[in-house]
Image: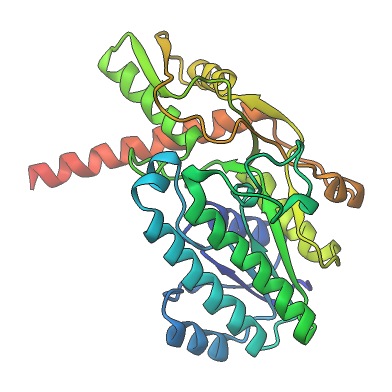
Amino acid sequence: MLKDSRIFVAGADTMIGSALVRELRRQGYQHVVDARPNLTDRTEVESFFAAEQPEYVFMAAGRSGGIAANQKYPADLMLDNLLAQNHVITAAHNQRVARMLFLASSCSYPRDAPQPMQTSSLFTGPVEPTNEGYAVAKLSGITLCKAFRQQYGDRFIAGIPANSFGPEDDFSPEDSHVVSALMLKMYEAKTAGRPSVEIWGSGAARREFIFVDDLANACIFVMNHYEGADPINIGSGDDVSIRELATLIREVADYGGDLEFDTRKPDGMPLKSLDSTVLQELGWRPQTTLRAGLAITYDWFLTHQAERTRSLELAHVR
Protein backbone atom coordinates (compact mmCIF):
# COMPACT_ATOMS: atom_id res chain seq x y z
CA MET A 1 0.00 0.00 0.00
CA LEU A 2 1.22 3.50 -0.82
CA LYS A 3 0.61 6.32 1.61
CA ASP A 4 -1.94 7.84 -0.78
CA SER A 5 -3.74 4.55 -1.57
CA ARG A 6 -7.50 4.52 -1.05
CA ILE A 7 -8.14 2.14 1.85
CA PHE A 8 -11.47 0.91 3.16
CA VAL A 9 -11.85 -0.70 6.59
CA ALA A 10 -15.11 -2.64 6.53
CA GLY A 11 -16.31 -2.72 10.13
CA ALA A 12 -14.72 0.53 11.31
CA ASP A 13 -17.28 0.56 14.13
CA THR A 14 -15.89 -2.69 15.59
CA MET A 15 -13.01 -2.96 18.03
CA ILE A 16 -10.64 -4.36 15.40
CA GLY A 17 -11.87 -2.02 12.68
CA SER A 18 -11.46 1.10 14.79
CA ALA A 19 -7.95 -0.01 15.77
CA LEU A 20 -7.12 -0.51 12.09
CA VAL A 21 -8.29 3.01 11.26
CA ARG A 22 -6.18 4.44 14.11
CA GLU A 23 -3.09 2.48 13.09
CA LEU A 24 -3.39 3.28 9.39
CA ARG A 25 -3.59 6.98 10.17
CA ARG A 26 -0.76 6.73 12.68
CA GLN A 27 1.41 5.20 9.96
CA GLY A 28 0.62 8.08 7.63
CA TYR A 29 -1.90 6.57 5.23
CA GLN A 30 -3.76 9.60 3.94
CA HIS A 31 -6.90 8.20 2.34
CA VAL A 32 -8.63 5.89 4.80
CA VAL A 33 -12.22 5.93 3.58
CA ASP A 34 -14.31 7.14 6.51
CA ALA A 35 -17.72 5.68 5.66
CA ARG A 36 -19.83 2.94 7.17
CA PRO A 37 -22.32 1.48 4.67
CA ASN A 38 -24.77 -1.17 5.83
CA LEU A 39 -22.74 -4.21 4.87
CA THR A 40 -25.72 -6.57 5.06
CA ASP A 41 -27.38 -4.61 2.23
CA ARG A 42 -25.93 -5.74 -1.10
CA THR A 43 -27.13 -2.73 -3.09
CA GLU A 44 -25.68 -0.29 -0.57
CA VAL A 45 -22.32 -2.09 -0.56
CA GLU A 46 -22.14 -2.21 -4.35
CA SER A 47 -23.00 1.51 -4.61
CA PHE A 48 -20.40 2.37 -1.99
CA PHE A 49 -17.61 0.47 -3.76
CA ALA A 50 -18.56 1.98 -7.13
CA ALA A 51 -18.50 5.51 -5.69
CA GLU A 52 -15.41 5.25 -3.45
CA GLN A 53 -13.36 2.78 -5.52
CA PRO A 54 -11.08 1.58 -2.71
CA GLU A 55 -7.80 -0.01 -3.74
CA TYR A 56 -7.23 -1.96 -0.53
CA VAL A 57 -9.85 -3.47 1.78
CA PHE A 58 -9.62 -4.77 5.34
CA MET A 59 -12.68 -6.90 6.12
CA ALA A 60 -13.11 -6.65 9.89
CA ALA A 61 -16.91 -6.55 10.03
CA GLY A 62 -19.52 -8.98 11.34
CA ARG A 63 -21.17 -9.46 14.72
CA SER A 64 -19.33 -11.53 17.30
CA GLY A 65 -19.67 -12.46 20.96
CA GLY A 66 -18.61 -14.81 23.70
CA ILE A 67 -20.03 -18.22 24.55
CA ALA A 68 -23.26 -16.76 25.94
CA ALA A 69 -23.96 -14.69 22.81
CA ASN A 70 -23.12 -17.62 20.53
CA GLN A 71 -25.54 -19.85 22.37
CA LYS A 72 -28.30 -17.24 22.49
CA TYR A 73 -28.00 -15.74 18.98
CA PRO A 74 -26.39 -18.38 16.72
CA ALA A 75 -28.60 -17.58 13.71
CA ASP A 76 -28.13 -13.80 14.04
CA LEU A 77 -24.35 -14.10 14.33
CA MET A 78 -24.08 -16.51 11.42
CA LEU A 79 -26.38 -14.57 9.09
CA ASP A 80 -24.84 -11.16 9.85
CA ASN A 81 -21.36 -12.47 9.06
CA LEU A 82 -22.42 -14.36 5.94
CA LEU A 83 -24.22 -11.36 4.47
CA ALA A 84 -21.51 -8.80 5.29
CA GLN A 85 -18.58 -10.87 4.07
CA ASN A 86 -20.32 -12.11 0.92
CA HIS A 87 -21.27 -8.57 -0.09
CA VAL A 88 -17.86 -7.06 0.65
CA ILE A 89 -15.82 -9.86 -0.95
CA THR A 90 -17.99 -9.82 -4.10
CA ALA A 91 -17.86 -6.02 -4.36
CA ALA A 92 -14.08 -6.09 -3.89
CA HIS A 93 -13.87 -8.50 -6.82
CA ASN A 94 -16.23 -6.47 -9.01
CA GLN A 95 -14.22 -3.29 -8.41
CA ARG A 96 -10.91 -5.12 -8.92
CA VAL A 97 -9.34 -3.97 -5.67
CA ALA A 98 -5.59 -4.48 -5.50
CA ARG A 99 -5.73 -6.57 -2.33
CA MET A 100 -8.13 -7.52 0.45
CA LEU A 101 -7.50 -8.99 3.89
CA PHE A 102 -10.46 -10.94 5.28
CA LEU A 103 -10.30 -11.54 9.03
CA ALA A 104 -11.68 -14.89 10.09
CA SER A 105 -11.48 -16.28 13.64
CA SER A 106 -9.61 -18.91 15.62
CA CYS A 107 -13.09 -20.40 16.16
CA SER A 108 -12.76 -21.60 12.55
CA TYR A 109 -10.42 -24.39 13.65
CA PRO A 110 -11.69 -27.88 14.53
CA ARG A 111 -12.29 -28.34 18.23
CA ASP A 112 -9.71 -31.13 18.40
CA ALA A 113 -7.10 -29.59 16.09
CA PRO A 114 -3.49 -30.27 17.16
CA GLN A 115 -2.01 -27.37 19.13
CA PRO A 116 -0.69 -24.87 18.29
CA MET A 117 -3.15 -24.78 15.41
CA GLN A 118 -1.80 -24.72 11.88
CA THR A 119 -3.82 -23.63 8.85
CA SER A 120 -3.49 -27.16 7.42
CA SER A 121 -5.94 -28.25 10.15
CA LEU A 122 -8.78 -26.11 8.78
CA PHE A 123 -11.78 -28.17 7.56
CA THR A 124 -10.36 -31.42 8.99
CA GLY A 125 -12.97 -31.88 11.73
CA PRO A 126 -16.02 -30.43 13.50
CA VAL A 127 -15.72 -27.01 15.11
CA GLU A 128 -16.50 -26.23 18.76
CA PRO A 129 -20.29 -26.69 19.17
CA THR A 130 -20.73 -23.60 21.37
CA ASN A 131 -19.88 -21.29 18.44
CA GLU A 132 -20.67 -23.47 15.43
CA GLY A 133 -22.79 -20.96 13.47
CA TYR A 134 -20.24 -18.15 13.77
CA ALA A 135 -17.35 -20.49 12.96
CA VAL A 136 -19.02 -21.91 9.86
CA ALA A 137 -19.70 -18.38 8.59
CA LYS A 138 -16.02 -17.51 8.94
CA LEU A 139 -15.02 -20.75 7.19
CA SER A 140 -17.31 -19.73 4.36
CA GLY A 141 -15.47 -16.41 4.08
CA ILE A 142 -12.09 -18.17 3.95
CA THR A 143 -13.39 -20.45 1.21
CA LEU A 144 -14.89 -17.58 -0.79
CA CYS A 145 -11.59 -15.68 -0.76
CA LYS A 146 -9.81 -18.81 -1.97
CA ALA A 147 -12.42 -19.36 -4.68
CA PHE A 148 -12.08 -15.82 -6.07
CA ARG A 149 -8.29 -16.17 -6.03
CA GLN A 150 -8.48 -19.52 -7.85
CA GLN A 151 -11.08 -18.52 -10.45
CA TYR A 152 -10.17 -14.89 -11.09
CA GLY A 153 -6.72 -14.35 -9.64
CA ASP A 154 -7.94 -11.88 -7.00
CA ARG A 155 -5.28 -11.16 -4.39
CA PHE A 156 -7.52 -11.94 -1.45
CA ILE A 157 -5.93 -13.03 1.84
CA ALA A 158 -7.57 -14.66 4.85
CA GLY A 159 -6.08 -13.88 8.25
CA ILE A 160 -6.93 -15.79 11.42
CA PRO A 161 -6.31 -13.69 14.55
CA ALA A 162 -5.97 -14.92 18.09
CA ASN A 163 -8.55 -13.72 20.63
CA SER A 164 -8.29 -9.94 20.52
CA PHE A 165 -9.09 -7.37 23.20
CA GLY A 166 -8.60 -3.68 23.80
CA PRO A 167 -10.25 -0.24 23.64
CA GLU A 168 -13.65 -0.17 21.92
CA ASP A 169 -14.36 -3.76 22.99
CA ASP A 170 -17.96 -4.75 23.78
CA PHE A 171 -18.44 -4.55 27.54
CA SER A 172 -22.15 -5.42 27.56
CA PRO A 173 -23.16 -8.34 29.81
CA GLU A 174 -24.86 -10.11 26.89
CA ASP A 175 -22.32 -9.95 24.03
CA SER A 176 -18.91 -9.46 25.64
CA HIS A 177 -15.94 -11.75 25.11
CA VAL A 178 -13.98 -13.17 28.00
CA VAL A 179 -11.61 -10.24 28.69
CA SER A 180 -14.28 -7.53 28.64
CA ALA A 181 -16.74 -9.78 30.48
CA LEU A 182 -14.28 -10.35 33.32
CA MET A 183 -13.41 -6.67 33.53
CA LEU A 184 -17.07 -5.76 33.81
CA LYS A 185 -17.61 -8.41 36.51
CA MET A 186 -14.60 -7.20 38.54
CA TYR A 187 -15.65 -3.57 38.22
CA GLU A 188 -19.23 -4.22 39.31
CA ALA A 189 -18.14 -6.46 42.19
CA LYS A 190 -15.64 -3.89 43.43
CA THR A 191 -18.15 -1.04 43.12
CA ALA A 192 -20.84 -3.00 44.96
CA GLY A 193 -18.45 -4.40 47.56
CA ARG A 194 -19.22 -8.01 46.67
CA PRO A 195 -16.81 -10.59 48.13
CA SER A 196 -16.49 -12.77 45.03
CA VAL A 197 -16.94 -12.96 41.26
CA GLU A 198 -18.50 -15.92 39.48
CA ILE A 199 -16.74 -17.04 36.29
CA TRP A 200 -18.06 -19.47 33.69
CA GLY A 201 -16.28 -22.82 33.40
CA SER A 202 -13.48 -24.49 35.29
CA GLY A 203 -10.83 -21.90 34.50
CA ALA A 204 -8.64 -24.59 32.94
CA ALA A 205 -9.32 -23.73 29.29
CA ARG A 206 -6.39 -21.92 27.67
CA ARG A 207 -6.56 -19.08 25.16
CA GLU A 208 -4.08 -17.02 23.17
CA PHE A 209 -4.75 -13.27 23.32
CA ILE A 210 -3.50 -10.39 21.20
CA PHE A 211 -3.89 -6.70 22.07
CA VAL A 212 -5.98 -5.04 19.37
CA ASP A 213 -3.40 -2.35 18.54
CA ASP A 214 -0.83 -5.10 17.90
CA LEU A 215 -3.40 -6.94 15.78
CA ALA A 216 -4.05 -3.84 13.68
CA ASN A 217 -0.32 -3.38 13.16
CA ALA A 218 -0.01 -7.04 12.15
CA CYS A 219 -2.89 -6.75 9.66
CA ILE A 220 -1.18 -3.84 7.89
CA PHE A 221 2.08 -5.80 7.92
CA VAL A 222 0.34 -8.81 6.37
CA MET A 223 -1.31 -6.66 3.71
CA ASN A 224 2.10 -5.30 2.72
CA HIS A 225 4.25 -8.42 3.04
CA TYR A 226 2.24 -11.65 2.70
CA GLU A 227 1.60 -13.06 -0.78
CA GLY A 228 0.50 -16.60 0.07
CA ALA A 229 -2.78 -18.19 -1.03
CA ASP A 230 -3.19 -20.04 2.28
CA PRO A 231 -4.72 -18.34 5.34
CA ILE A 232 -2.21 -16.87 7.76
CA ASN A 233 -2.39 -17.02 11.56
CA ILE A 234 -2.00 -13.72 13.41
CA GLY A 235 -1.12 -14.44 17.03
CA SER A 236 0.99 -13.22 19.90
CA GLY A 237 2.68 -16.57 20.53
CA ASP A 238 1.59 -16.93 24.18
CA ASP A 239 -1.44 -18.55 25.79
CA VAL A 240 -2.81 -18.44 29.34
CA SER A 241 -5.53 -20.27 31.23
CA ILE A 242 -8.79 -18.49 31.96
CA ARG A 243 -7.89 -18.75 35.65
CA GLU A 244 -4.55 -17.00 34.99
CA LEU A 245 -6.30 -14.37 32.89
CA ALA A 246 -8.89 -13.73 35.61
CA THR A 247 -6.13 -13.36 38.19
CA LEU A 248 -4.34 -10.78 36.03
CA ILE A 249 -7.56 -8.82 35.49
CA ARG A 250 -8.26 -8.92 39.23
CA GLU A 251 -4.86 -7.30 39.79
CA VAL A 252 -5.38 -4.68 37.08
CA ALA A 253 -8.85 -3.84 38.46
CA ASP A 254 -7.49 -3.76 42.03
CA TYR A 255 -10.28 -6.07 43.15
CA GLY A 256 -9.67 -7.98 46.38
CA GLY A 257 -12.45 -10.55 46.18
CA ASP A 258 -12.40 -14.27 45.40
CA LEU A 259 -12.76 -15.94 42.00
CA GLU A 260 -15.44 -18.64 41.93
CA PHE A 261 -15.52 -20.92 38.87
CA ASP A 262 -18.88 -22.40 37.87
CA THR A 263 -18.04 -25.80 36.41
CA ARG A 264 -21.68 -26.28 35.34
CA LYS A 265 -21.03 -23.74 32.58
CA PRO A 266 -19.11 -24.71 29.40
CA ASP A 267 -15.40 -24.10 28.94
CA GLY A 268 -15.54 -24.04 25.15
CA MET A 269 -12.46 -25.40 23.37
CA PRO A 270 -9.91 -26.77 25.86
CA LEU A 271 -7.07 -24.88 24.15
CA LYS A 272 -6.88 -22.33 21.35
CA SER A 273 -3.33 -21.44 20.42
CA LEU A 274 -2.12 -20.43 16.96
CA ASP A 275 1.03 -21.41 15.13
CA SER A 276 2.10 -18.00 13.80
CA THR A 277 5.47 -19.17 12.47
CA VAL A 278 4.79 -17.81 8.96
CA LEU A 279 4.07 -14.33 10.33
CA GLN A 280 7.10 -14.44 12.63
CA GLU A 281 9.38 -15.52 9.80
CA LEU A 282 8.21 -12.52 7.78
CA GLY A 283 9.54 -10.39 10.65
CA TRP A 284 6.51 -9.36 12.73
CA ARG A 285 6.37 -9.47 16.54
CA PRO A 286 3.83 -8.05 19.03
CA GLN A 287 4.89 -5.00 21.05
CA THR A 288 2.44 -5.18 23.98
CA THR A 289 2.53 -7.66 26.85
CA LEU A 290 -0.74 -9.19 28.01
CA ARG A 291 -0.68 -7.34 31.32
CA ALA A 292 0.11 -4.00 29.69
CA GLY A 293 -2.70 -4.50 27.19
CA LEU A 294 -5.12 -5.39 29.96
CA ALA A 295 -4.17 -2.23 31.90
CA ILE A 296 -4.72 -0.01 28.83
CA THR A 297 -8.06 -1.69 28.16
CA TYR A 298 -9.27 -1.34 31.75
CA ASP A 299 -8.29 2.34 31.83
CA TRP A 300 -10.30 2.87 28.64
CA PHE A 301 -13.24 1.01 30.18
CA LEU A 302 -13.13 3.13 33.35
CA THR A 303 -13.06 6.37 31.34
CA HIS A 304 -16.02 5.37 29.19
CA GLN A 305 -17.91 3.93 32.14
CA ALA A 306 -17.56 7.28 33.90
CA GLU A 307 -18.77 9.10 30.76
CA ARG A 308 -21.73 6.74 30.49
CA THR A 309 -22.64 7.31 34.15
CA ARG A 310 -22.51 11.11 33.67
CA SER A 311 -24.72 10.86 30.58
CA LEU A 312 -27.29 8.82 32.48
CA GLU A 313 -27.25 11.29 35.36
CA LEU A 314 -27.76 14.23 32.98
CA ALA A 315 -30.61 12.42 31.24
CA HIS A 316 -32.22 11.77 34.63
CA VAL A 317 -31.94 15.45 35.59
CA ARG A 318 -33.57 16.54 32.34
Side (left or right) of 60 relative to 45: right
Count how many numbered circles sit on residues in the image. 0
Q: Quadrant of residue 308?
A: top left
Which of 189 and 265 lies nearest the eye of the viewer?
Answer: 265
Residue 210, placed above or below residue 56: above
Give the colouring mode of the picture: rainbow
Side (left or right) of 265 relative to 116: left
Residue at left 43%, top 36%? Answer: 301
Instruction: State the image coordinates of residue 241 (x, y, percent, origin top left).
Output: 61, 23
- Is residue 5 visible in the rendered image? The answer is no
- Is residue 186 visible in the rendered image? The answer is yes
Residue at left 51%, top 22%? Answer: 249
Check the image and name the residue furthest to the right: 281
**Quarter of the rendering occupied by the N terminus:** bottom right
Instruction: State the image coordinates of residue 224 (x, y, percent, origin top left).
Output: 81, 65
Check the image and name the residue furthest to the left: 318
Which of 30 and 109 lies nearest the eye of the viewer?
Answer: 109
Residue at left 76%, top 60%? Answer: 231
Instruction: State the image coordinates of residue 128 (x, y, percent, origin top left).
Output: 55, 43
Residue 11, placed above or below residue 73: below
Instruction: State the image coordinates of residue 108 (x, y, percent, origin top left).
Output: 62, 52
Check the image and name the residue furthest to the front: 125
